[in-house]
Image (cartoon, helix red, strand yellow):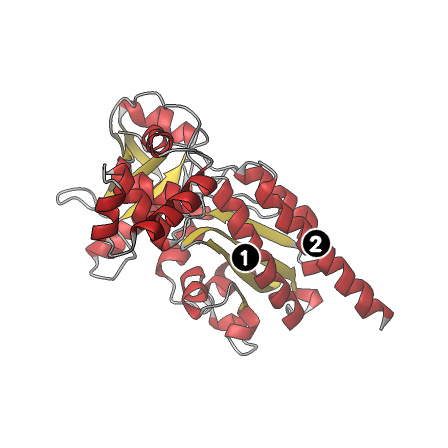
Amino acid sequence: MGSRGSRAAAAQQAIEGVRELAGAGLTVEQVFRRADELLRDVLEYDAVCWHTADPATGLVNSVLSDDLSLDSFENAVRLEVWADDPATFPRIRRSGVRAETLSRATQGRPERAARFREQIAPAGFGDELRATFDAHGGMWGCAAFMRAADRGHFLGRHRELADTAARHLGHALRACHLPPGGGADADAGPAVVVLGPSNRLVAISGPAEELLARLADPSRTSLGLPTAFAMAAEQARRTASGLPVPQAKIRIQSGDGRWYVLHGSSLQGSAAGEVTVVATAATLADAMPLYLSAYGLTAREQEVAVLLVRGCDTRDVSRLLTMKPYTVQDHLKSVFAKAGVASRRELIARIMLGGGH
């Protein structure tokens, strides 16, 4: 009983630590590393792979791992996009929970999953616990925790603890994606890369070299280019094969707070398996919903904020959203408080500066 009580106390202390990450002013990488310090002992995992994601689609766009070899990361990307496995990040998200173990999802037979057979088991692990970090309608990141084969499967208490921690990590990562405090430098133009069948670099345009460095993963992988580009290429291949994709484009934020949109396409006449990925600075239309979500605005508050940025006054918002003027004012007060501004002009300026062109 004493052991169970001390375990529960340690878990509660870890959750409190994770909860505090949202207000700590950390970078994404710092959030992940601090979360690892807090959770490793209580979740009892032996390795972890952290990811950020496109909040709109939930598609993974970066990787951080100090535990795992990423020497064949192109296979991980392929499995993530193509394998019809149990307990994938999209399936977990659609299920209404935030965390799931591969052993539970396969009724104790994880070998049914391609990623277990091809990656997890060969690396010496016996189970995987995945968690998605959602907040305010966006998936800001996710993680895969691995447990050594000789330690048995993850237990129900591990999954429940990961589910609780995931909610707080969603808020912590959301807080990392606020608009930058000042204007960003002008971009040189679209960056274009051509990727071969294994998502290795074949050709590159001038502006792309600098952008690839800015969007580089925290961990070096065998790809030699950011994960987001490989994911965009695989989404293009799925589209070309007639299979459904969440969206053709993937969004990723650079370290200076600027959002970029990556779009892959398989071109006729190109070599087999080659894909072109074009990266452009996000337009205001692309970036604004992400910034508003990052502020923690509700869906209704986002509707009000969007109309304000478009130049509508209180009367216009009231008419377009069929709500009372005083209700609009209440929403405005909440929007200003969450965005840390005192007026419509300040809100518009902050969003416009953060949203690029």
Q: Is residue 328 left or right of residue 190?
A: right
Residue 57 visible within the image = no
Residue 301 visible within the image = yes
Give coordinates of residue 229: x percent, y percent.
Answer: 35, 41
Q: Is residue 66 left or right of residue 195?
A: right
**Helix, strand or loop at disc 2?**
helix
110 vs 285: above or below: below
Give coordinates of residue 272: x percent, y percent.
Answer: 22, 47
* Camera-side residue of 111 and 146: 146
* Camera-side residue of 274 and 285: 285
Task: Identify residue type, mark 2.
Answer: Ala
Give coordinates of residue 270: x percent, y percent.
Answer: 17, 42
- Mark 1 neighbour class, 10 Å CA radius: few under 14, some 14 to 19, many 20 or more: some
356 vs 125: above or below: above
Give coordinates of residue 194: x percent, y percent.
Answer: 27, 36
Task: Identify residue type, mark 1.
Answer: Arg
- Mark 2 neighbour class, 10 Å CA radius: few under 14, some 14 to 19, many 20 or more: many
Q: Which mark is residue 176?
A: none
Which of pointers 1 and 2 lies earlier in the amino acid sequence?
A: 2
Q: Distance between the Cα atoms at labels 1 and 2?
A: 13 Å
Which residue carries the number 2 mark? 14
Which residue carries the number 1 mark? 167
Q: Is residue 116 left or right of residue 244?
A: right
**Which quadrant would residue 155 be assigned to in this image?**
bottom right
Q: Residue at x 33, y 36 (%)?
A: 260
